[in-house]
Image: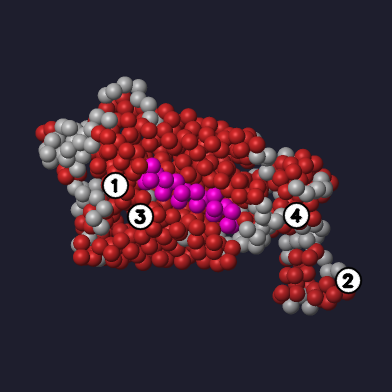
Amino acid sequence: MASNSISVLNALDNARTQWYHVTAIVIAGMGFFTDAYDLFCISTVSKLLGRLYYYNPTTGKPGKLPHSINNLVIGVALVGTLAGQLVFGYLGDKLGRKKVYGITLILMVICAICSGLSLGSSPKAVMGTLCFFRFWLGFGIGGDYPLSATIMSEYANKKTRGAFIAAVFAMQGVGIVFAGLVSMIMSKIFLDFYAGPSFSSDPVFSTEPEADYVWRIILMLGALPGLLTYYWRMKMPETGRYTALIEGNAKQAAADMGKVLDIEIQADQDKLSQFNSANEYKLFSHEFFRRHGRHLIGTMTTWFLLDIAFYSQNLTQKDIFPTMGLTNKPENVSALREMFETSRAMFVIALLGTFPGYWFTVAFIEKIGRFYIQLVGFFMMSVFMLIMGVKYDYLRNTNHKWTFAALYGLTFFFANFGPNSTTFVLPAELFPTRLRSTCHAFSAASGKAGAMIGAFGIQYFTQDGDVGKIKKAMMLLSFTNILGFFFTFLVTETKGRSLEEISGEDGGYDEPPQCVENTIYKACSNHHHICSVLPRLPLQQQLSRHLHVN
């Protein structure tokens, strides 16, 4: 009895693409929009905070966040995200996707708003408040990783599932673009009304007092997408797979999915009981590791290696932005002008280099497949980073700015039309329903551990701007991408197959394989040893395998 003989699963796998799928992509993608928006706008906000709260007249330079404070402001959200992924990923399997899905959104909305508040006016109070709420903002964002991926994979049909999950993740690209756009617009508006002189002209008044409103408004606006989609997120029913396969309520699953898909679905409660009885192994069991251990190692290592490189790519920004003429030296501009120029540069790079890669994945993932997109992405990132590492002195010269920009942009492009997207998609497809959210959480948390190495380790190594260190770092990142290329061989292609077929849930409970009469007997008669070792598969799959061997 294959999984597609259970009507609700068959209906989901073969449903035509509907407007409901599009709304689900937008609703599920808001967490990634907020994630990217917060991560990228904090880069410009941190520059403004340095000029507002850490100006030291004795240095003769604009204020700048101390390295320890800057790492804390940026890194605390990564720590929160990792923790949130593990907690909410586990709860998603135990309590249900929908029950905890609303909690993550509420947490993101509240903490995005509170990130713009301060319990005091001293640098210590401002940074303390910001870091506290950024941790919990990251905690909520972390929960959205496994939940959104799992929900989308369980709603989608098998023909377009990869594209739908990739589209959810592509909202990260939209968030990156909007982070630059909103920061650019807000700083420009305040510049038009309150523009100050450059730092070299007037060190004190070059930091406009009104700039203290700008960073708060930008961070608070990160709550808007979540507020707009909260109602629709709460209206989403529990996924049919969770209701049927975990709660064991086939009737409710059929009713819920029947409304969503606008069709009538049979309950099949008796078939469901037989299905569940064959898939009762636990996460930390020998049976799980026999079936899925290789895939879990594959998804965790590739995401870990990818994020080391992905979160280290901004180490070249301080050279590429001035080389391209997108930014001036901080001494030559005011605080708001510096924020505007940095935001504009980020917006241009995101729009031309980062953003397209996400949607190339959406367009081609069902044609090329997850496996090959990930392989090619890792390989191309390795090549481009190696070239930048070897030729960094040559590239940072203004005479070669277009070559530098092309290599930088292509690295981002193949990260997103590559492992940055596929490492999100694959864990949502490879594992059984009862453990899908938890396994995705493990994979995502492994990625965030890699992000911390990139954000803290690599950045700390290159923080003095030494060109020799940057070259070594780029070559090291090239090597981590090659490692990701080889670890990709631990995962398998998933396109075009049902979730139950991929995870093996549909083949673990049938009658023992046996040589049956007529054609099947003839296919088996010369290969009786095969029958004795075949796993317990549905009849149709037994025949297919026998004929393939024969």
Q: Nearer the viewer, residue 169 or 298?
A: 169
Q: Are marks 3 and 4 in contact (CB under 8 Å)?
A: no
In percent of width and height, residue 458 lies at 31, 50
Mark 1 highlights which residue? 342
Q: CA distance from mark 2 to mark 4?
A: 29 Å
Ranked by sequence position, the earlier of labels 3 and 1 is 1
Residue at the image point whose x is 27% and y is 38% from the top: 191
Asked if residue 439 can be seen in this view, the reply is: no
Q: Specify the label residue 311 is tagged with.
A: none
Identify the element where label 1 is drawn: helix
The residues colored magenta run: 162-182
Q: Locate residue 400: give its quadrant.
A: bottom left
Mark 4 highlights which residue? 10
Look at discs 2 and 4 and give the one toward the viewer: 4
Q: CA distance from mark 2 to mark 3?
A: 65 Å
Q: CA distance from mark 3 to mark 4?
A: 43 Å
In the image, taking residue 110 as reference, residue 237 lies left or right, namely: right
Q: How many marks?
A: 4
Ranked by sequence position, the earlier of labels 2 and 4 is 4
Residue at the image point whose x is 65% and y is 60% from the top: 159
Q: Is residue 6 above or below residue 128?
A: below
Q: Are marks 2 and 3 in contact (CB under 8 Å)?
A: no
In the image, taking residue 512 as reference, residue 393 lies left or right, namely: left
Q: Are marks 1 and 2 in contact (CB under 8 Å)?
A: no
Q: CA distance from mark 3 to mark 1?
A: 11 Å
Mark 2 highlights which residue? 517
Q: Residues within 10 Å of mark 3 (few under 14, many from 20)?
A: many
Q: Specify the label residue 349 is tagged with.
A: 3
